[in-house]
Image (cartoon, coloured by chain):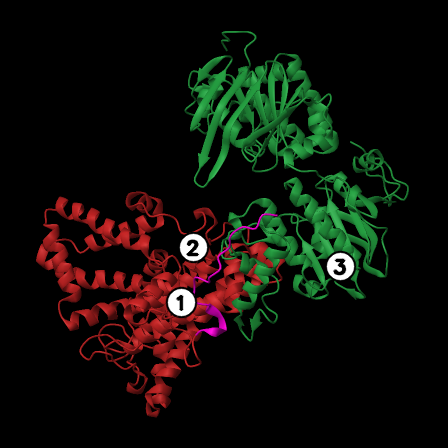
Amino acid sequence: MSEQPRDANDPEANGGGTNGGGDSGQGPPAGGRGGLQGAIEAYFRAAPLTVPLYAVLLALAIGSIVIILSGANPLTAYQALFTGIFGTPELMASALARSTPFVFAALAVAICFKAGLFNIGAEGQLLLGALSGVWIGGWGIIAGWPTLFAAGAAVIAGILGGAVWGFIPGLLKVRTGAHEVIVTIMLNNIAILFLEWIIGSRNPPILIDPDATAARTLPVVDAARLPSLFPGTGLHTGLLIAILLCAAMWYVMRNSTTGFEIRTVGANPAAAHYAGMSVSRTTILVFIVGGGLAGLGGAAEVLGSRGGYLTPGAYTGIGFDGIAIALIARANPLAVIPAAILWGSLLAGAPLMQVVADLSIDIIRVIQALIILFVAADMIVRTLFRIRAPRGAADVDEPVISARGWGEG
Amino acid sequence: MTTADETAPAIEVVGVTKRFPGVVANADVSFSLQQGEIHCLLGENGAGKTTLMNIVYGLYQPDEGELRIGGKPMRFESSGDAIDAGIGMVHQHFQLVPVLTVTDNVILGQEPTNGPFVDHETARQRIVELSERYKLAVDPDAQVADLSVGAQQRVELIKALYREADILILDEPTAVLTPGEVDEFFEVVRELVAQGKSVVFITHKLREVLAIADNVTVLRGGRVVGSADPASATVEGLASLMVGRDVRFTVDKEPPQVGDVRLRVNDVWVNDDRGAEMVRGVSFDVRAGEIFGIAGVEGNGQRELVEALTGMRQPTAGDIIIDRYSIVGATPRQVHGLGVGHIPEDRNRHGLVTAFTLTENAILNHYHVAPFSQRLLLNLGAGRKLAQRLVDEYDVRTPGIDVKAGTLSGGNQQKLVVARELDQELQLLIVSQPTRGLDVGSVEFIHSQLVRRRDDGVAVLLVSAELDEVLGLADRVGVLYRGQIVDVIDAEEATRDHVGALMAGAQGRVGAGEPGGGS
């Protein structure tokens, strides 16, 4: 019987009930060193970002080759990109505003990844949420309510709309074995076309604003508008909600029994079944939560944006970008925040780069694609920058993306 | 293959050292395989047997030392070099494509061509020739998926022979075979040697070593700790050489103090996922304080039966009563709540989440009850305390309770599962293949723990394909054949031969219903 040395001291803050004294135990633990330094260290321990960070650098480096090939100076281009994001407080606020819906969408995808489910449907869930939000937000009854209740009602409607759209693939998967990828892709199309019809239809008019020339809904009542965080820009309170939800989801995944069930189902559904968890219940629950998060994102976007109305083509692509962002964040809810802000900021800074460096705006899409490539194929980055796999062999890490194949569910 | 010297050893390994980060897998190992002999390489899991043979087969390059084939120094850069030098290896896990025919599998990677086309006919002829010459009885046109495990193994042999191997390395070849198939396989190996092949036989099963080896080399902890002449060696002597101390082969146990019936299985029928009837009308009782063993070749319904008894699968007919309650229709959690522990047959699939820490695995099926759950939150502090206690009490060798379960060795993983399932209030313990693939030390430990809980008054159902395990532990033995219990025998009356015959389909005394039909 050889006694092996064991870790005597507990390296991490003791998660669980000991952490956070009452008010909000949701923030990342602030570490013992105190101050900003400690908080940052604690954050990165909770949401390790090494590979994605290097992936961004590598993508920018290779992007500069593409820029040279298209006849521009990468330094000028990147400088313009930087100015386009950080040039003025207004620009910074706009970049954050651009990022807000991405946080919601990516979180919706990341939560499903945790349970081994591939939610391609954030797109449709977000649109349904936006539609529900704009519909309830346009009701005359709530016009006289205080903002908290009026906007709250519209936001809850958005959550419900998205949750219903998420519930469908979850239920179909559990009941019939229909693969969630196929179902959510089709539901996306249904959502897009449904929105086009319900907003665009003039005969009979359903949600269309009869006085507007282009098809769009009536704006929501003023009481239902989300307060702006930076007047003059599109930045609204939705960003704060998004960040709070990311922290809450991180905490739930780590420290709650439901989170434990979700992670177990994602890592090994057979073991979850053995351990007495209901794989079906968890699958449906996760899809409802994911759909609700995306729906909330859609509603917040309508209620917080400058017009307060919805047009048929609005917000397309956000759900798909959410998949990419969730991947960059390796499905870690805390890491979703910087990943989404990076994503949105690149898009927000691109127009200035286009003008100054005389480049196609699609260069940004190339750089984004390269980031995803290097995050997904992380061996490239690990080899180039000699990053060691985290403690414990790489192949036994909790799978980041563990969507299951056909017919296994 | 060119041999400079007819009397030179087929393989000679001189002073080979192979290091992996943090471990020395082989330390100054020397070993030689004479031409035309069967040489057993004996050692526990992790002793370095497979590493050594992977070096010989060119999959690894040694850090130090020399490899000579037929007397000539060699340095293989890949397995292709080793194949060219006349070495063939049959891996523990077969490398076959199930949907292809035997012929396609054999020629894969070395397809004979006729212009741009694959020349199936020539290949087929050669396979038939090889099959006849070495008495392998393989149908070249059969689809591999339809073959028995034993036949698939012979396809692997043909693959090696087709590539003109003179030296065959067999890695744990009997791990997947039934007792009858093992005997057949030994005949095949003897035939190969009789026709001039040389064989390295990697195993940790002592009985097999004595049955087949011409020579034995024992590895422990990456070093050669001895060799033996099987004519004079004993099982006990080899075991203590392999483990490094004396090993007990019989489990000490008192006569059972039998109590009430804790599990009553009444004419239960269970289907597998594809709807095939795997359990067909099984009835038996297990009483408190006894170990009821179920012997049988794998695939005769054991998995489905155990899953039905633990709530993981619903029977199509019949009744299962645990401690007065019928559990038909119950969930795994409800069954667990009756005080039923379950050590599943596949620890990586069901027993553990390898990506989780030891702590998370320790609470895997108790996470929802106090003290591990407080309202909706996990109390990881309580979980860590439990994990630490399990690790200490059940001697799980680990650097700490925060490492991933997947980083532990198989034996320690299984000890963790056993610890979790035994460390609770138990009425009934259902144990499936508890020691598969484990080293002797872990096997001893787990057996003694099962007997300890039996003596505490727990009813134990032990399902195992290892006949020795069932005979050594059980107080009564039921034999499962084609989904039916063909006989139930008291352990004192059960002999290896009799139970072995029942496992292969011989009629029992109280056989239930229609004959199974022999094969």
Report which quarter residue B442 is drawn in: top right
Three-letter code, disc 2? Val
Residue name at image x 73 percent, y 65 percent? B338
In whole angstroms, how far apart are the C-alphas of marks 3 and 2?
A: 37 Å
- The green-tinted chain is B
Which residue was labeled with disc 3? B428
**Residue A150 placed where, x, y %?**
36, 86
Classify A233 as above or below B78: below
Taking the view exactly as shown, the residue that stands out farthest to the right is B509
Residue A165 in the figure: left or right of residue B282: left
Q: Which secondary structure, mark 3?
A: strand
Classify B146 as above or below A256: above
Which residue was labeled with disc 1? A125
- The red-tinted chain is A
Classify A140 as above or below B170: below
Residue name at image x 52 percent, y 7 percent? B5
Residue A400, disc? 2
**Residue B143 placed where, x, y %?**
60, 30
